[in-house]
Image (cartoon, rainbow, N blue to C red):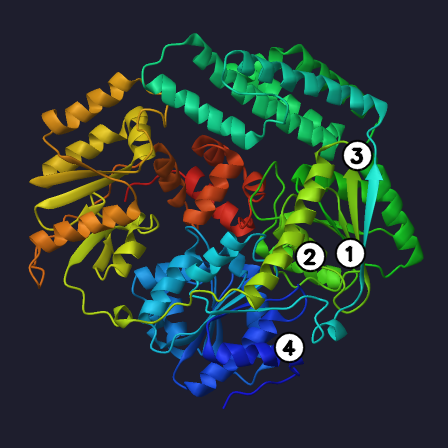
Amino acid sequence: MITLKNFQPRAYQESIQQTAKKYNTLIILPTGLGKTKTALLISIERLNLYPQSKTLFLTPTKPLAEQIQQEFQESSSLLKEEVVLFTGSVSPETREKLWAKAKVIVSTPQTISNDIINKRINVEEVSCLVVDEAHRGTGNYDYVWLAKHYYQTATYPRIIGLTASPGSDQVTIKAICQSLFIEEIEVRSKTDSDVSPYVQETEVELVKVELPEKLLKIKKFLDSCIKDKLEQLKSWGLIGSLQEAVSKKQLLLLQKSIQFKLSHGEKDIRLWQGISITAETIKAQHALELLETQGPESLYKYTSRIYEEAEKTKTKAVKNLAKDLNFKSAHILAESSIKEKIEHPKLIKLKEIIQEEVKKNKEVKIIIFNQYRDSAALIEKQLNVIPDVRAKLFVGQTKKEGIGLSQKEQAEILKLFGEYHYNVLVATSIGEEGLDIAEVNIVIFFEPVPSAIRTIQRKGRVGRQTKGRVIILMTQKTRDEAYHWVAFNKEKKMHQTLKTLKEKIKLESYTPTLDRFLKEPKVTIYIDSREKDSGIAKELIDQNVNIETKNLITDFVISDEIGIERKTVQDFADSIVDGRLLDQLKELKQNFPRPLIILEGDEDIYSVRKIHAHAIQGMLATITLSYGIPIISTKNTKETVSLLKVIANRFQTTKPREFTLRTGVKPLTLKEQQEFIIESLPGIGPSLAKSLLESLKSVSNIINSPEEVLQQVEKVGPKKAKEIRRVIDEEYKNG
């Protein structure tokens, strides 16, 4: 029998456990109140009830998975080897062996999806599926398919969702519940009687600042730049009244609308100009946001990139924006502001706050949130000149302008922060969600964010074991004010919605039906290995189709006669431009007597790319008349799968007849060819090949880079760099 250790359940955790005994449950608890421990309670109960079963704990990132694995090992009598970690860094073969012996598997959802598709694991024996950060459980995120597949497959299904902030409206919360087959909601706030004894008081302070005269002058130029462009769009009838601000979302929709009109033959010159001016407006709006929320240095970096790009590109939007007098004036003033050492007043106020707090308490721990990496890096640099301040940048993995941390580096920084090696963490959004960061005294928002979920997660970093403070810096009469009140109202609405759902609304629970007990698949469809991430493989599995992933010449093979190439509308247009399509057509025609193209998507094919309608029509005619390949259109993935299944049922008997499977390699895109070349280097897999190309930009740059440059790329150490250079540099010897 599995037991708890080093952990005494709280009353509200035991109360939630009672609900989870009977129902799939969404558990909503403020950050720091033991969501993982509550899931641990439920998991152990299920494992004891079904001794031959397993718990599968899904969480979005590897650092989170490692923390949860450790928590299960430390707080239960499970043996260490019975609680295993699944991530992409563990080989598929190893994962298959670990699954067989494990009682608790902690994994990222993408890894589990791949293992199910490739038939390495079977979730039939899982008696408890825990979905961490359950607010992600909507749309195409892997949680949605995994929950559905699990509920259709498991012998004793139970789903537990965990989140601190599910969303601000009833529609969003219900969508999460439907995706995860939730039957009951257990929600607690810090004011609930069974929770309040465990919650420390958190003081929220709004610190307002005003832009100095020089920055207001820059703002005026950018405002004028945006206003002029919007007035042009209005004069051409492309937008309506300017009484209210025109958002980026509205401008993106406008771009799409104009492209649609052009592709359908409208020849008004204002439409072509309108596309360019809309793009200019979006860029100018971003410049204004950087000025208002971050300061002149961030603005100047951005505008400098615009001017650099204007010298190289033929894109009218960039060139025209670079010529705009208002934009140019803002760029020049931003540069002079930096020379005059004019800082954003929020940065000045931030340094004052940090200096004062560190002076008062040498053991204070502070997290500063900033959503821009270059601004966060600037803050780290400026804080580290203050006596007794030991600030450290904490960002995600993706390298942007040389700034990025591996998951190992992230874990080490959190450890050192916990040990007071650092006393200030300057974090981007990576620090908001889920990570078990050491007890923090103060959280500072460098800028408000217009999201209830992100606001709640930021605030949740304090007030766990001791009293805490939240300080929100706000620039008056800028979007900072708007974002703050948007988030405030969304959070308020979320609490009201949850209360309503808990007290008045009975959610439509998922009732298990006979469709859970699937019959043996009747047809087999072979899928090219690169199609397994498209959603097709998951949908085919849901439709009771046996799938086999292989390296194929085309996307799908139904029989020795039938090969099928699937193109989304966007990919169809892209493949006309880059020339891939004709090669793929030749391969398809040469290898299959009955070739077929499926064109998937409900977008207008003439407006997804800037391609003349005649070029698209010419290609459609070539496919059907010159190559004799029929084209069938489908609206979405579900409809494509339905068509594939119908074709398979039509051309395969109850037991699929044997046939020789034509395997090979599909024509590679330029991107895939570049990755293929770099993957051939010693010790370089797909992930590292992408990192090298992203960092060094081209194959030739990688080939010509010395060892010390290669080592700057994440996960390329001295040995690997030396071996790469050896393979590249040593003389070829035949025999």
- For residue 626, above or below residue 496: above
Mark 4 lies on residue? 12
Kind of element beneath mark 3:
loop
Comes first in the chain, label 2 or label 1: 2
From this view, report whether residue 25 is shown above or below residue 428: below
Give the alpha-carbon distance from disc 1 to disc 4, as whole Å: 34 Å
SS for callout 1: loop
Q: Residue at x 41, y 58 (%)?
A: 144
Q: Which residue carries the number 1 mark?
A: 422
Crowding at dot 4, Cα within 10 Å, few <14 / some 14-19 / many 20+, comes out as some
In terms of depth relative to the viewer, which is nearer, 111 or 666?
Answer: 111
Q: Nearer the viewer, residue 613 or 557?
A: 613
Q: Eyeballing the image, is 335 above or below 423?
A: above
Write the residue at 36% across / 59% down: 114
Give the class, few, some or many, for how many residues have Cα within 10 Å of label 1's Cα (few <14, many ≥20): many
Residue 357: % across, % down: 89, 53
Q: Position of residue 212 (x, y in %)?
A: 84, 27
Q: Nearer the viewer, mark 1 or mark 3?
A: 3
Give the residue type that dot 3 points to: Gln
Q: Quadrant of the C terminus?
A: top left
Q: Nearer the viewer, mark 1 or mark 4?
A: 4
Q: CA distance from mark 1 to mark 3?
A: 32 Å
Residue 222 position in % (x across, y down): 69, 20
Q: Mark 4 falls on what kind of element?
A: helix
Q: Residues within 10 Å of mark 3 (few under 14, many from 20)?
A: some
Q: Which residue is mark 2?
A: 413
Q: Based on the displayed image, in which of its 4 quarters is residue 372 positioned?
A: top right
Residues under labels 3 and 4: Cα distance?
41 Å
Using the image, tell me which numbered label, if any, was put on residue 476: 3
Q: Position of residue 596 (x, y in %)?
A: 15, 39
